Image: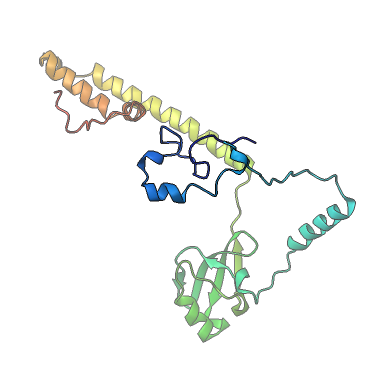
Amino acid sequence: MELKKGRRLATKWDKTAEDGFGLDNLLRNSLKKLGGTGRPGSNNTETGSFSYLIAQRSPNHVESIKNIEYERSHNSSTDIDEQDPKNWPRIISHPGKVKKNVKLTVSAPSGKIEIWQIPKSLGKQVYHDARKLARGDLWPSPLGKKGVIVKNSLSDEKKEKLEAILKTQKKSFLKEQRKKDWKKVTTADSTYFDDDIVTMADSIASSLEMTKKYKQQGKKAKFDVDLKKYEGK
């Protein structure tokens, strides 16, 4: 494979240089070092050799599929080693301290958010340690808990319903807001229109600049003018 032709075949490519090598900016001693060991057979080309790997997906192997299914079922087992610190629950919010009781909101090994009750009846030392916990700490599972409350996670169906309710409420709110704005304009005092046209235009422009839509369009257009400091010059 012919890679390149030139005065110094051992040099590296320099895409920023006009000659492709960048030899004009090098000293003579540096050029000698980059000269290589000569050109075998007086050739003016280089020959490069490359090593490559061809990946091909193998056909489905029955034994391999069985091993994969076994590993999946084994790893998804509910049997959790509570002695392993990697399986201890982590405190995700500040513990709630009640009289002779501590409520811990934890990310449990089950993958759910749970509230653990640590009463004083479990032991003075356990109760003392629970009161000293902070957010981000681990709670050793062997120390136990009195009660567990599992927080139900929202299903996809409930999430879609909540999003639909949010959209409808937002639309109704904007509609009511537009009605109020229009009512203010229609019921305005006649003296409001006695101002000169420049003052009225400034007030309308100021109210427009404070809208969310105007700011978003300004960001898309990449305006670098601060509207608060701009005086029309």
Q: Give whichever of 72, 111 is nearer the camera.
A: 72
Q: Is residue 65 above or below residue 161?
A: below
**Can you give x and y, in whole percent of width and height, for residue 20 in the image?**
46, 35
User: Left or right of 178: which side holds 170?
Assistant: right
Nearer to us in this view, 35 or 52: 35
| Nearest the eye: 25 or 219 | 25
Q: Is residue 226 above or below residue 106?
A: above
Q: Is residue 153 visible?
A: yes
Question: In the picture shown, does residue 96 fall above or below 232?
Answer: below
Q: Is residue 189 visible?
A: no
Q: Quadrant of residue 211?
A: top left
**Going by the image, does 202 lie left or right of 125?**
left
The N terminus, quarter of image: top right
Residue 115 position by quadrant: bottom right
Residue at figure coordinates x 44%, y 28% from the top left: 171
Which quadrant is home to the C terminus?
A: top left
Q: Residue furthest front?
A: 41
Image location of residue 12, percent across then percent down: 49, 43
In the figure, 82 relative to 29: above or below? below
Q: Residue furthest bottom?
A: 124
Q: How is the image coloured?
A: rainbow
Count of marks overlaid on the render: 0
Residue in the image at 14% along x and 15% along y: 193
Q: Is residue 138 left or right of residue 178?
A: right
Percent of width and height locating residue 6: 50, 35
Which residue: 23% across, 18% down? 187
